[in-house]
Amino acid sequence: MADSPWRIRAAGAFDQNKDENYFGFGESTLGPLTYPGSPLIYHHFDDYTHALEQNAGGQTWEHYNNYWRTHIGGLVTVERDFWGG
């Protein structure tokens, strides 16, 4: 295929982020911050994250909004040289 006008190319990608935050979806997530371990409502993100890190009875909620996002992708192209370039 070295002297052929056709070329096949392939590329792959892998991305993983362990520090993504997830607060849900929809309009209800735009309100004050809350979590199941507390009856309080937090209006400032710093106060909210500090409360999540507190140890209450041997349990913390510090990873409550965290999730691992993994993205795997690929691309294959077939090209043909029409003008001898």
Image: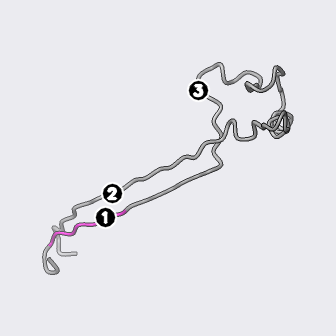
Residue ID for mark 2: 75
Judge from the rendering whether residue 8 lies leftward or rightward of residue 32; answer left or right: left
Residue 81 image position (x, y, % from top left): 18, 69
The crowd level at tag 2 (other Cα within 10 Å; few <14, some 14-19, many 20+) is few
Residue occupying the point 22% across, 75% down: 85
Residue visible at 85% across and 38% down?
Answer: 54
Secondary element at tag 2? strand
Check residue 10 for magenta coloring.
yes
Q: Nearer the viewer, residue 40 or 59?
A: 59
* Tag 1 and tag 3, C-beta contact below 8 Å: no
* Amino acid type of the residue tagged 2 in the rendering: Leu
Residue 40 lies in what quarter of the image?
top right
What's the amino acid at mark 1?
A: Ala
Residue 45 image position (x, y, % from top left): 80, 35
Stretch in magenta? 5-11
Residue 8 vs residue 35: left or right? left
Mark toward the start of the polypeptide (2 vs 1):
1
Q: Nearer the viewer, mark 3 or mark 2?
A: 3
